[in-house]
Image (cartoon, rainbow, N blue to C red):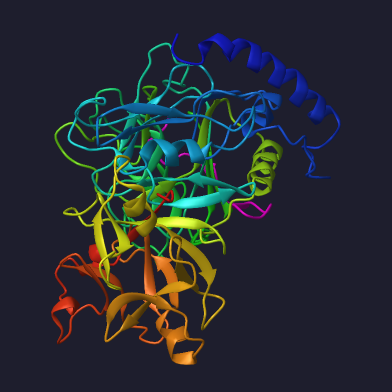
Amino acid sequence: MTRGSWLSHARRALAAVGATAVLAAGLLTGTGTARAAAEGPCDIYAAGSTPCVAAHSTTRALFGSYNGPLYQVRRASDGTSHDIGVLSAGGVADAAAQDSFCTGTTCTITRVYDQTGDGNTLVYQGPGGTGGADTAATANTEALSVRGRKAYALYINPGNSYFAYNSTGGVPTGSSPEGEYMVTSGTHVNNGCCFDYGNTEIDHKADGNGAMDAINFGTECWFGGCTGTGPWVQADLEDGLFSGGSRMWNPDQVPQSSRFVTAMLKNDGTTRMALKGANAQSAGLAQLYSGALPSGWSPMHKQGAVILGSGGDCCQTNRNASAGTFYEGAMVKGYPSDATDAAVQANVATAGYSATTPFTPGAKVSLQATTSCCTGDYLQHDTSDDRVVIAPVTSASSATDKGNATWIVRAGLADSACLSFESADSPGQFLHHSDYQLHLNADTGGSSFAKDATFCPSKGNSGAGTSFQSVDFPTKYLRHYNYTAYIAGNGGANAWDSSTSWAADTSWLVAQPWG
């Protein structure tokens, strides 16, 4: 058995006893949503006689008693790997451990551990992983809050994917019944094939109808005739993404565009399946389909491997084309009841997923460049004058260099909903633009300076990290160009407005403060 097996049976026994008591108290009947704080989705599934056989998350424990690693990161600087665990049993990920380990370099998520102890740990499909053509996802692209604590998402872009197969791992095969859920995002999707989580082929090939049983989430319209633009919760049963029980578009499908989305699929393997979706921040759960399996896909022929981020016929020689975000998910034996589904969704809602940013006034941050040329460079003020530049900072750098690259977050001087950055080692002096170039100077107290020193954060223009929009020039963003900092538009008369690498140059990773 693999990592975590030493506590697998004990945890399951405790989960079954404790959660069964909750069931007996009637808390799965819809009469209430109050639950023990430490209970996780897999405790709820166990109480419903549909135990988890695979449980994955980068944000939290899915068992109330789980106290092991959630995922593994590898840093680019020296190739060393480190497991990221939870703050306490049944708790949230220790994001600070990742921040500390990855300071001064970039990290990728190389594996997501199976919390059941059954050995279905997801590993990236590429060299050094399971083999294949893909790569591991960047570890700090998206920070979020879970139960008020910082955590990181598994942010999958085209070319990233994960796979697991363990012949003794207990994942349902053949026509055995199975249920799955995942928490994903309705704001990071595309129409590429195929952002899946669930049961897949063991040989990375499309082995015919019914060889897969996975949740699909995205805007892909496989058979045509789709209504709206999605994204939708669908079933990837191999050789088809199904919105319902046939190739025809299911009119009960509803786009799931919330920032955080719960997606569910259950399939008894012979006659019926169901699809459900919800805003993961609320307790409601919409039934999108419940009925017969598609004709030609019954009975199922599941093989028992696990996929995340791609279709089944990927990614040994071809690369994943899909984009999506994974926060947590599980696969279970059996066909979960509607009451169990509702209780799992209630548990997800109480986890408190939130898109809060790390820009709390008073917090110290360092801003790391994301352009491929400069990922070791950080935004800092020049010691010889008042200009602001990017330059390398490492653990071996001087205290002066580290201090120059550290900023204190302040409420925006011109707009409190946005931000200003005060130098950590030069109190009272703020990052501001003058003639579009960035400088560090003392606050004059005037409205013009306040506007020049205020920036509004948004999702990174490249899709990674954060971009900072000038409050008084809203088409311009904080950018590095030839190692000097400007506010710049995407195209224009000035050299620093060049559209080449603009999206990457205006996207920044929020790193642990150097000073």
**Which residue sits at x=24%, y=28%?**
204
Give the quadrant of residue 188. Answer: bottom left
Q: Residue furthest front?
A: 384
Identify the residue shown where x is 25% and y is 29%: 79
- Compared with 442, 285 (above or below) is above
Residue 24 locus on image (x, y percent): 84, 27
Confirm whether the magenta stretch covers residue 286.
yes
Viewer can see residue 296: no
Residue 448, percent across and down?
Answer: 44, 91
Q: Nearer the viewer, residue 434 or 113?
A: 434
Which of these two is toward me, 28 or 241?
Answer: 28
Q: Residue furthest bottom?
A: 447
User: Residue 366 appears at what percent x and percent y?
Assistant: 39, 55
Q: Quadrant of the N terminus?
A: top left
Quarter holding residue 133: top left
Side (left or right) of 89 relative to 392:
right
* Nearer the observer, 222 or 51: 51
Q: Position of residue 232 (x, y in %)?
A: 45, 56
Relative vertical location of residue 64 with respect to residue 151 in this rendering, above or below: above
Tell me which segment is drawn in magenta.
280-300
